Amino acid sequence: MTEIPILFEDDEIFIINKPAGVSVQGGQGVSHPLDEEFAKQVGFKVHLVHRLDKETCGLMVVAKNAKAAAKWIDLIASKQVQKEYTAICFNEPLVNGKKVKSGTISGSVVRKNGKNEREQSAVTNFTVEEVFTREVPVFSENPEEIASKLIPLTFSKIHLKLGTGRMHQIRIHLASVGAPICGDDKHGAFKLNKLAKKTLKIKNLLLCSSKLTIPTNDGKTRVFEIELPEYFLR
C-alpha cells in the first residue's frame, strides 16, 4: 500500500487524503485497513474519529492519542468540524418531479446490524454546481457488433453538506432524488454504471470528501480543500 498523503499535522491530529478503495478499519475480509497501515507509516498507534466509506476518497481527521480522539469526536458531533463533499451523479436531482439546483433531503436511512434494522433520521444539503452531457455508444449483447447508435448521458456535479452523518447517507439520499452517484454499485443505477464503465471507463465511486473546516485553538477556523482525483475529471 502506498503512503497516505498528510496535509496537516499538529500535536493532536493528522489531516489526511484517503485514497478510494481503502477501508478505514479492519474486519472480516478486510486487508490493509487505513488505521493499521497509517499507524505503520507514522510509527505509532492512531485513533479514528470519523469514517469514510471504503470507496469514498478524500479528507479525514485522524487523532494521535486517545485524549485527542475524544476531543475531536466531540467537536465533530457538535458540528464544529464541517465536512463537505463533491459527487458526480447521473441525471439531475428531482424534487416533486421538477429539476432543482439546490435543496435539502431529509429522508431517513436504515442502519443494519446483523439481522436487526433501525431507521435513522438523516439530513443532506445539496447544490448542483454543473450539469453536462456526454454522448456514449450503445452496443447489443453481441461483442462483435459495432456501436449501433450514440445516446446522451446527463451528469451533475453536486456539492454536499451534511446535517447528519449516517452510513451511506449521501449515496442513499442522492439516489432517492433520481441522481445516483456514478460508480455506486450498492445504492446507484446498475445499468447506467455498467454503461458508463464500458464507454467512459468510470470504475470508481465518484464521491470525494473535498473540503474540511476545523476549529483552531485560538478560536478561529482553518479550511482544507483538495482537488478532485483525475478519474473524476475524465
Image (spheres, rainbow, N blue to C red):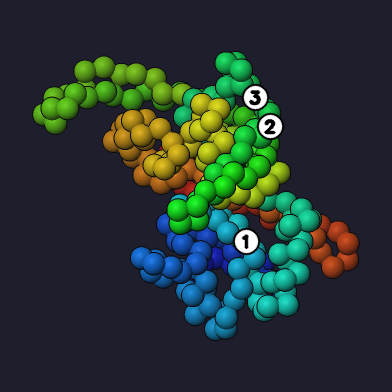
Q: Quadrant of residue 220?
A: bottom right
Query: Outermost residue, front direction?
Result: 116
Label at residue 50 = 1
Residue 156's x, y, as percent?
Answer: 53, 29
Q: Earlier in the sequence, mark 1 or mark 3?
A: 1
> Residue 90 versus residue 29: which sits nearer the camera?
29
Query: Outermost residue, bottom direction?
Result: 43
Mark 3 is on which residue type?
Lys
Q: Residues within 10 Å of mark 2 (few under 14, many from 20)?
A: some
Query: Outermost residue, right direction?
Result: 219
Label at residue 104 = 2
Label at residue 101 = 3
Residue at left offset 36%, top offset 44%: 203
Q: Where is the N terminus found, in terms of image quarters?
A: bottom left
> Residue 192 versus residue 104: which sits nearer the camera?
104
Residue at left offset 61%, top offset 21%: 95
Q: Where is the C terminus found, in terms of image quarters?
A: top left
Residue 64's x, y, as percent?
Answer: 65, 77
For the residues labelled 2 and 3, the Cα–Cα distance comes to 11 Å
Mark 2 is on which residue type?
Thr
